[in-house]
Image (cartoon, rainbow, N blue to C red):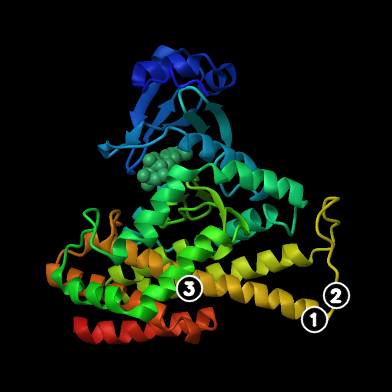
Amino acid sequence: MDQTSYRTLDAGGIRAFLAGLPAIATRLGGLAEQWQVREVSDGNLNNVFLITGPAGEVCLKQSLPHVRVDPSWKMPLDRTHFEAAWLCAIGPLVGGLTTEYLHFDPVLYVLVVESLSGHTVLRTALMQGADWPEVAPRIGMFVARACFGTSLLARPFEDVFDARRLFAANQALTRITLDLVFDDPYRDHPRNHWHDSALSPIVLDIRTSAATLLAVENLRRRFLSQPQALLHGDLHTGSIMSTADDTRVIDGEFALYGPIGFDCGMFVGNLVLHFFATPDLAARQAVLRDIDGFWRSFHAQFTALWNADDAPPPGTLRPLAYGPAAHVAQQAFMDEVMGDTIGFAAIEIIRRLIGYAHTADFDSITDPRLRATCRAGALAFAYYVLDHLADMRTIADFLSCLEENERKGLSIRA
Ligand SMILES: Nc1ncnc2c1ncn2[C@@H]1O[C@H](COP(=O)(O)OP(=O)(O)OP(=O)(O)O)[C@@H](O)[C@H]1O
Ligand SMILES: [Mg+2]
């Protein structure tokens, strides 16, 4: 790829660039000089802009040769290439649960997608008290459709192997996940930080518990060695934009082939962070409902696709066994995904509390003592889960454990 003409676009550069793309210029309408360019970057990595014309709006994302919030941390530009490839792969599978792909430029590393300016980032909406019961089931549907449709259950192995080869090159971002999620939090590293000294004894417990560290090692190995499906790879509540009626998954730049429970676990882990960050009992009950609703929807959709009567494409692995034994084998596969989900959820909670990239959920708690208690509750819960993975046989076990923690948390808060 030609990297010699890469330049970071400012508002003028964005207008000139989009004016050269007839379909997008028509979508915006009017003259390029009339287009409003508004920066909405709020993540760590890329520049993101919304461009509004008299007839419509688009969203433009450009990768930088470094981490946006830390120019000294150099990074290859190709992450928008992988986000574009992910969007093209899963867009046709997920029935409108992501953004419409409009254009990718391989020299400027610019991705243009449909604008969702009427939607709110789910993490922000949750912090503002939104209670949208349909969102979590929609995410379950999204993960089921994207994962099933990119797996060996739905495609000939030749297609899957080609896709695996493409996404296996997304190594810079897979390295970030490996280091920031699975490694740094479990040892001293300058990128780690936590705000409350109340977390320090739990951090020490986590780092000195052989059982916990072996559980993390096992999940890390599974993350790299179980290429079950094309994952989003960073499915936290900041990678979802929603209204009450319409939900979209964005930001697939971390896409890779991996264990399906990784995407499920990222989402569930971030719901749990919100659970511990909200002092409102009804909102906490809503999180329990959402985790349950997510899993039920994922399970129902994934198994429905698996058991559907439509003929799979020629060359797809043909079932060799039918009847009760096949049903038991399918259940074993779903249980394995569930076990991964619970483990990866715990890992995500830990890294968001003591690693590099924290989430904003706890910032809305103004009392510092309460904030520390809530963060410590979340960290202690994740530690407990990793030490008791073998006892968590169902999502209901996981939810009872959360409720149990809630009861303990309430007595601490009182
Ligand atoms: N299609 C869209 N329409 C409207 N706003 C969007 C759209 N895509 C992204 N945004 C806004 O831009 C922000 C940053 O987008 P995105 O998360 O893709 O960037 P990023 O740099 O990859 O972030 P991160 O560092 O978290 O990975 C989002 O939080 C959202 O507010
Ligand atoms: Mg991103």
How many numbered dots are placed on residues in this image? 3
Q: Label 2 vs label 1: CA separation?
A: 7 Å
Q: Which residue is the site of mark 1?
A: 325
Determine crowd level at label 3: few under 14, some 14-19, many 20+ residues with C-alpha closer than 10 A: many
187 with respect to 262 (left or right): left
Determine crowd level at label 1: few under 14, some 14-19, many 20+ residues with C-alpha closer than 10 A: few
* Badge 1 element: helix
x 45%, y 80%: residue: 399
Three-letter amino acid code of the residue under disc 3 = Ile
Q: Earlier in the sequence, mark 2 or mark 3?
A: 2
Q: Which residue is the site of mark 3?
A: 342
Residue 179: x percent and y percent? Answer: 37, 55
Residue 113: x percent and y percent? Answer: 52, 34
Three-letter amino acid code of the residue under disc 2 = Tyr
Which of 50/207 is in front?
207
> Answer yes or no: do the residues labelled 3 and 1 have beta carbons within 8 Å?
no
* Badge 2 element: loop
* Badge 3 element: helix
238 with respect to 72 (left or right): right
> Answer yes or no: do the residues labelled 2 and 3 have beta carbons within 8 Å?
no
Residue 7: x percent and y percent? Answer: 38, 20
x 31%, y 86%: residue: 407
Q: Label 3 vs label 1: CA separation?
A: 26 Å
In the image, residue 229 sits, relative to residue 325, either above or below, namely: above
Three-letter amino acid code of the residue under disc 1 = Ala
